[in-house]
Amino acid sequence: MPETEKLYNDDPYLAKFKAKVVGISGNVVKLDRTAFYPEGGGQVGDRGRIGGVNVEDIQIIGDAIQHIMEAEPGFNIGDELDCEIDWERRHRIMRLHSAAHIMEHFLWQRLGEIERLGSRVDEKKDRADYAYEGRLPAEELKLVEEDANRFLAEGHDIEILSDPARPGVRIWRCGPMEMLCGGTHVRSTEEIGAIKLKRKNPGRGVERVETSLA
Ligand SMILES: [Zn+2]
């Protein structure tokens, strides 16, 4: 399958673009280039429109990005189309994804590096599951929220670095924090605003921290 040029890596703020249709199979469309982020790394796939048809989900198979359309499209292979991401939704996802990394930094500062078992961020919230026996202490979580909100308000830059020695690897950096991440992020913590944290217990030995925008 041919590789799709991933425009979201160079510019996560690109919401409108033109692309050529290189494959159609039922309601699945492949483009030569795309700014639609495919589900992966705990981040949900984008929504939007391609050639006026609604996009329901984005998946990646190998290096080919599959745009899953609401219906079988009327356009053809070779057509050059106007594409548009649902930007309001994607921007919330970017704010929440960056916020979740910052929340974790302060969580680990207070409670030690508890193991993250998984995470998922959509436009409503980030859910991060940690291996933890018992209940995450409410007063500690409140302090993590305060630490994170103080840091966010300070307006720190967020950078994405790539490592020439490791092609495809992307590093997220903000102040003293650094981690591997292939998701889309905002440029500054100021863009996030304040966050709220909530604890959940999805199962024995697992504690979930939900991060939402305040
Ligand atoms: Zn991430």
Image (cartoon, rainbow, N blue to C red):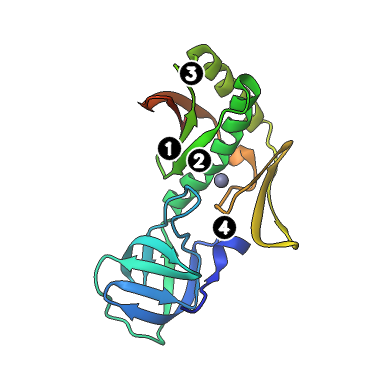
Say which label, 1 or 3, has the lower sequence index: 1
What distance separates the C-alpha of mark 3 from that of mark 2? 21 Å
Distance Cα–Cα, label 2 vs label 1: 6 Å
Q: Say which residue label 2 marks.
A: 96
Bin the neighbour count of mark 3 within 10 Å (Cα to Cα): few under 14, some 14-19, many 20 and up. some
Q: CA distance from mark 4 to mark 2?
A: 14 Å
- Mark 1 element type: loop
- Three-letter residue code for mark 4: Pro
Please give the residue where the numbered disc 4 appears in the rendered image.
12
Do the numbered discs 2 and 1 sit on residues whose CB atoms are within 8 Å? yes
For mark 3, what is the residue?
136
The reply to whether residue 192 is in sight is no
Mark 4: few/some/many CA within 10 Å (<14, 14-19, 20+): some
Q: Which mark is residue 125?
A: 1
Q: Are marks 4 and 3 in contact (CB under 8 Å)?
A: no
Q: Residue furthest bottom?
A: 78
Closer to the camera, 92 or 180?
A: 180
Give the alpha-carbon distance from disc 4 to disc 3, as whole Å: 34 Å
Cα–Cα gap, marks 1 and 4: 19 Å
Kindly identify the amino acid type of the residue bearing the numbered disc 2. Leu
Q: Is residue 28 left or right of residue 4?
A: left
Query: Label 3 is placed on what type of residue?
Result: Leu
Instruction: Answer with mark 3 or mark 2, whichever residue precedes in sequence.
Output: 2
